Amino acid sequence: MTHLGPDERIWHYDGASATRHHPRIDWTADGFTLRWDTGSSGPHGWSALVPVDGTGGRAVYGLRGQSGWRLGFTGAPPESFVAHLPLPARYGRWIDRIGLWRAIGLFGAIASVVVVLALKAPGWIAPHIPRSWEDRLGDAMIGDFGGRLCETPQSAAAIEKLRRELGDDVPIRRIGIANVNMVNAVALPGGHILLFRKLIDEADSPDEVAGVLAHEIGHVRNRDTLTALVRQLGLSVILGGFNGQVGGTINGLLSMSYSREAEKAADDYSIAALRAANVSPLPTAAFFAKLTKLSGGETVERSTSWMASTPVSAERAKAFRDSARKGQAYAPSLTRAEWQAIVNACRDDKDVAPPPSFGF
Amino acid sequence: MSDDQGRAFGFEGTWRDYAPIAFTNLLLTIVTLGVYRFWATTRTRRYLWSRTRFIDEPLEWTGTGLELLIGFLLVLVIFLGPLLFFQFGIQALVLQGHGDIAFAIGAPLFLLIFYLGGVARFRMVRYRLSRTFWHGIRGGSDDKGWAYGWSYCWRYIVAMIPLYLLVPWAMTSLWNDRWSAMSFGPYRFSAKAMPGQIYKRFLLFYLVPFIMFIVMAVFGGAMFATMSAAPQADPSQPPAGFWLFFAALFIGIYGVLPVIALIFYAKFFRVAIGSLSLDTLDFHFTARSKAWLKLILGDVALVIFTLGIGAIFLSYRHWKFFVTHLDASGEISLSQLTQSTTAAPGQGEGLADAFDIGAI
């Protein structure tokens, strides 16, 4: 048996009172005992010792299962004693075991995989969610849109004509004109598309609305709203580790960059649909250019978290412009009377609810 | 008790010592997508506590990253899941035009969040005291804070009714309630802050916006009058006073208001800590408004000039500020300072974490 102290540089708290003891330590290969003039502690096995932060040249140890028990050394304890002591934890047990830089490399690799999965997985999962679930979810979310949908028999017929021409094979369940004073159009879960009143007011011809509508039909066809919904839920869980602000920022960035990809696909659909319907893409291109001016640049307006946005940009207008064929005899998408029915739908529908005073 | 430096509390850390902790914390937090932040918090506190001397011994932080993570996950599962569901549901209700039902569900939900915010404030203090050791003795509380959450709710609601004029009363009485439920070792804290002590500063904080508004209205009215009385040569150019008006408005809102809020808070904090005692020990806090202002301006400069990286030193700065201005007078008997018998909470400050509640 070896011993050390009693010594001013060895101190002990028993965890029962705040009195400081200067014990003598007796130890063997198996464990140690502390003895001071009024009491003792031990014998304890070496494995019961837990290193507490070594601060300012002190080495401090706790005892497993005994709250407040401390054995401390001012300066380093003697070599023969140190041999039995556990190393203090630094970054955390797992990280200490493999080393800081290797841990950073490992975590970084895992994090990249998680981020890629978070970006891609919604696109894989969404198509496997049954349409009936999506329909029920969409209906629960939108209902009759608070009675704010404008419809006359004539406008319904005109809209139906657009639907047949632009997306006959897409499971669209409703295209509505919403009495909301916003220049926007949205695709919602469950095959719902809403054209907001101001959008129609701003459009000069049915072909402009046709281009925007075909874009939203593209979203419905690709089930983008559902993908966005799944991604948002998934990201909020994965990024939960960050505190609110950081997580929110990253969340926003990721869902936006992904949504651009989806927007491009919807544009491609729109261009193809207009071509198949023999409708000129030029009015839509002009409309986009006009909206860019209205919205003051390339701002993405996300109205509600799960509503697909329709960002407008010069680049997108160009894609539509370039798709026009020279010398092609395009036909207007609607007759004059049909277009007027859509333009006047909100005015002529007598029992539509007034537009909400708040923007959402 | 000898006290070389004259103050009961002292801070002996340096930012150079802390820098390796701060930078590795940042790095590990990034590569783990935020999960490491619980361990990062723990490492930071271990360092800060161990460099904080009270009379003859440093404090010791014994909390672990794992228990913070568990606390966080518990809150995520129990509260945030349902909250997320409600949020989507309420959005859907508003969209469907059932604003009244949305309000009927939303209002109690808002109250519940407010209640949990109060509980979180209580439990944060309780958790921190239970993990803070000095001479092998810790603090804590046998109260779990559920009742405190209710007084937090009703007191703030009552305080709002007479146009927020009772807010100082709510603040001081809640501070008293919270700290009177806490203990260290065998002793209970006692807090006796009175609203009268902070009322003058509160009125300053309360009235300055009104005064500013009146001055602005008079100034703006005078400007408008001169503008219409003597039309300028070039009516498309606003007079110089116009820009001066907006500059003054900007400074008023972003410069003056935060400063008077700080002046009020400085007083509140001085009064609140000054009212705190533990057995025969009386606490004092010496930071006046100027010191607080210097702290905040320093924070802003640090974050801006390091392009945000400096933010990792904020918790260090705040703790140092807190400790260097904290003092205590009176006697403490080490042999009578026995171990706390309060039940130590099993997990960390998940609620406070979820609601983003800071320490100071």
Image (cartoon, coloured by chain):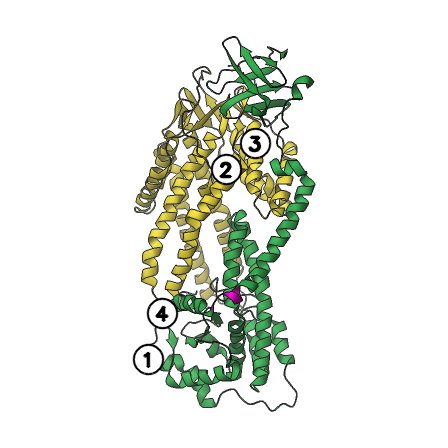
On the same chain, marks 2 and 1? The answer is no
For the residues labelled 4 and 2, the Cα–Cα distance comes to 47 Å
Read off the chain for label 2: B
Label 3 neighbourhood size at 10 Å, few (<14), some (14-19), many (20+)? Answer: many
Which mark is first along the chain, 3 or 2?
Answer: 3
Among the chains pictured, the one given green colouring is A
Mark 4, residue position? A146
Rendering coords of residue B57 (x, y %): 54, 21
Q: Name the residue that disc number 2 marks.
A: B67
Closer to viewer: mark 2 or mark 1:
2
What residue did someone put label 1 on?
A350
Asked whether the beta carbons under mark 2 and mark 3 sit within 8 Å of each other, the answer is no
How many residues crowd around disc 2 within 10 Å: few (fewer than 14), some, or many (20 or more)? Answer: some
Asked if residue B131 is positioned above or below residue A21 in the image, the reply reads below
Residue at horizontal 48 percent and vertical 90 percent from the top:
A335
A357 sits to left or right of A104: left
Cβ atoms at labels 1 and 3 below 8 Å apart: no
Q: Marks 4 and 3, how far apart in space?
A: 55 Å
Give SS at disc 1.
Answer: loop
**Hey, what amino acid is under mark 1?**
Lys
Q: Which chain is yellow?
A: B
Give residue A276's position: percent from left, percent from top. 58, 85
Position of residue A246 measured from the top left corner of the image (x, y, whole percent): 55, 50
Query: Dots 2 and 1: beta carbons under 8 Å?
Result: no
Whether marks 4 and 3 lie on the same chain:
no
Tell me, yes or no, whether the two marked residues, 4 and 2, touch with CB atoms within 8 Å.
no
Q: Secondary structure at mark 3?
A: helix
